[in-house]
Image (cartoon, rainbow, N blue to C red):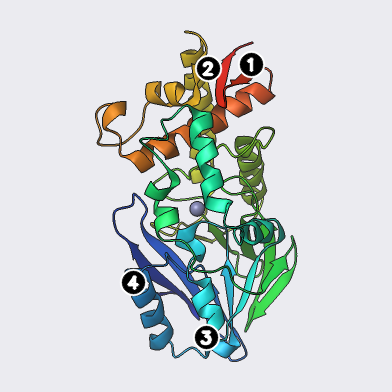
Amino acid sequence: MLNQVYPNIYCNQLPLPRTTLKWLNSYIIVSPDRNLIIDTGFNNEICREALFNGIKELNLDLSKTDVLMSHIHSDHAALADVLEEKGCTIYAGEKEKDLFEKMRDTSFWPNLNKLITLFGLDTNEITVQYSPGYINRLKSVPKVINPLKENDQLTYGEYVFNVIDLPGHSPGLVGLYEKKHQLCFCSDHILSTITPNITFRDFGHDSIKYFIESLQKVEKLPIKWLFTGHREILGDPKERIKELYVHHEERLKEVLKIMQTGEKTVAETASLMTWSITAKTWETFPKGQKWFACGEAGAHLEYLNNIGKLKRRVTDDVLYYSVR
Ligand SMILES: [Zn+2]
């Protein structure tokens, strides 16, 4: 479904059935010279059809169209290769480009199974094959990904966008800021009614810290419209940013309280946290959701480790945290 959200700016809602995200906001900015598509949807039939219906409705010349993959997640980037084949020029943040390049290696997805073991989940029960990101992944990584760095400018008609680095949800997530119109495209950095997934990536990679710093960066910008990656578009996001600070403060308090009862794996910690999900018990969590929950728990545990409240050890490839 295509809606004009601002002059010459359209939001193409691409359905994401069986996900809590419900749909992706893929944005299309049209101008007489070049057009821009921000994010592509999953590599599946339903997204492909919706994406190309929007392109057809706007009569876009794909040889004059750029595509920004805001970050590596499949719901944002997995049709970029299809668009490249049709003549589009592909962009991503420079850090995210490195991740996309790693995806060319066949070990990329199987390597994620190591995280499942590290979290203390059972790899007989959960593997990467259950994740929607894997199921709907890029068929092949685009041949040429043009890297963008902070403050690079992209111009489409009357809109001059500055690239802003917004690490946290993903290490190299980039947004676009339009100063004159006070518009910001922030992808999954800020969402209206759901909290963006902040996940454990590696030791020393402090996703929560980066996310909070990126929130502070957006908080400083005058914004009339915040074009988010999923769900409803927001006006001035200052209130929403405050809610997200509070959410993570409360999460950190909750995790620290759980840790008072003794050393735990990431999965054990996640199983004791509160989640807004219909599943009543940890055992009945859908497989993909268990992994997501562990990623969130791990990010908060690692943050607490980095500020000296917790310590960690790894034994037999499994990660344990305890109070310092
Ligand atoms: Zn995402």
Q: Which residue shows up at 64% across the image and 64% down it?
A: 177
Is label 4 in a helix, a strand or a loop?
A: helix
Residue 178 percent across, percent down from the top left: 64, 68
Left or right: residue 305 compared with residue 73: right
Q: Amino acid at mark 3?
A: Lys
Q: Which residue is mark 4?
A: 45
Which numbered disc covers residue 309? 1
Mark nearer the viewer, 2 or 3: 3
Q: Residue 284 appears at what percent x and percent y?
A: 26, 32
The alpha-carbon separation of the residues under discs 2 and 1 comes to 8 Å
State whether residue 76 is above or below residue 282. Answer: below
Look at discs 1 and 4 and give the one toward the viewer.
4
Q: Counting other residues with Cα less than 10 Å from the Cα at mark 4, is it few (<14), some (14-19), or many (20 or more)?
A: few
Residue 89's label in the rendered image is: none
Label drawn at residue 256 = 2
Give the SS element for disc 2: helix
- Residue under label 3: 86
Q: Amino acid at mark 2?
A: Leu
- For label 1, count other residues whose C-alpha is less than 10 Å away and answer few (under 14), some (14-19) or many (20+): some
Which residue is rendered at x = 53% and y = 27% of the image? 249
Q: Residue furthest top?
A: 261
Which of the 4 quarters of the picture holds residue 176?
A: bottom right
Which comes sooner in the sequence, label 4 or label 3?
Answer: 4
Give the CA distance from mark 2 to mark 3.
Answer: 51 Å
Measured in 3D between alpha carbons, the distance from the residue under mark 4 to the one under mark 3, in whole angstroms, is: 17 Å
Q: Residue at x 58, y 89 (%)?
A: 63
Q: Of the residues shown, which amino acid type is indicated by label 4?
A: Glu
Q: Amino acid at mark 1?
A: Lys
**In this view of the protein, which residue sits in the foreground, 29 or 106?**
106
Mark 2 or mark 1: which comes first in sequence?
2
- Is residue 7 in sight in this rendering? no
Q: What SS does tag 1 mark?
A: loop
